[in-house]
Amino acid sequence: MLRPRPLGPLDRTAVDGGPAGRQRDGRACGGPEAWVRTLQRSAGNAAVTRAIGQARGQQAAVQTVVQRKWPGPNAADRHHTDDPTAHPEWAMYRTLMTDAGFSANVVENLWSLLVGGLREQETINSASADPSLTRTERRLRREGNDWYQQAIEMLRENSGFTTPRMALWSGGFDVCKYAQSKGYTPMEFTRAGRVFNELEFHRNWGLQGPLWNALSKFYAAQATGPVHIFLRSYSPDSVLIGQEVPQLRQLQRIHPEVELIWHPLYTDEQGRIREVSRDRELVDDAPYANRDTCVAVLYDYLMYRHDEGNGHAARSYQEMQSDLSKNVNPGPSK
């Protein structure tokens, strides 16, 4: 299994544009898999990417950015590790990253790691299919993509994620946008998150899903103060409940100032997201100090005040009914 070499002190110049980011002849050699080998050495990534881009005369065409959450039929169906700049999302990625203020070397090195990570994830997923593995072992293997970890480390070093008034969310991307409109910062609205959220890395979600999980886990770990959690539906299997919140609980043991503030949400007949009060009213702001109260208030409203003719909230209502039929209990609040 190929793994990127951890970046050492001398390699940091590849990130900052120093001599380690140059390959002597400026070109990849050794066949179509040369990119995979150069990815194992941080030196050379930027120069090789730039050389190929110049040879093809590629221009970072400005495109209308459409919000994407799930890969569409036109998403890439192969990794492009032999030439990352041939990936159909390269031009959009380069434009967005440049507009966000990242240097050319960071843009190119990061893209190489991301594209290499797609191929690595395919190898990991195949190995994780071993029926002798437990569910936990399978999950841990799928999370062990060193390429993605190196990419996240590069973003950390270049201030890709900021955490003023951190927000986490569950229940559809418009919940994320709602949190941002209230003045909070979901990961998708950080400097790097805005870029990543626009890209379709691969048609197979199983290759990029672990990247988003790793990004979410990293982002939650950056909390230094209150974290606002916006919840339109409760799912024990969601990344929020299964991964981000448990990580925050561990962080609270070290940093007591990390406080979790929960907001139950409901979408009214006009399509407006509102928060739910204890007396079953829709209001502008209804924070709760713990998860159990938030979920109880949300379920109570869906049970007694939801109008089945309101298609905007139909999914939340159906998910609640499904959870109750399975006797899902949020468990002890910690």
Image: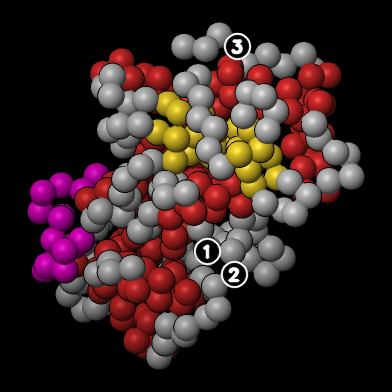
Q: Residue 325: which disc?
A: none
Q: Which residue is mark 3?
A: 331
Vertical relation: 66 (above or below) 258: below
Asked if residue 313 can be seen in this view, the reply is: yes
Q: Secondary structure at mark 1?
A: loop
Q: Residue at x 28, y 24 (%)?
A: 257
Q: Secondary structure at mark 3?
A: loop
Depth check, mark 3 against mark 1: the one in front is: 3
Closer to us: 122 or 198: 198
Q: Which residue is mark 1?
A: 198
Residue 134 x/y as whole percent? 60, 18
- Disc 2 vs disc 1: Cβ atoms closer than 8 Å? yes
The mark that comes first in sequence, 2 or 3, is: 2
Q: Residue at x 43, y 55 (%)?
A: 189
Q: Secondary structure at mark 2?
A: loop
Over which residues does the magenta segment extend? 4-20
Q: Which residue is mark 2?
A: 66
Asked if residue 120 can be seen in this view, the reply is: no
Residue that extends furthest to the top in the rendered view of this protein: 332
Residue 180 x/y as whole percent? 47, 51
Q: Is residue 119 left or right of residue 303?
A: left
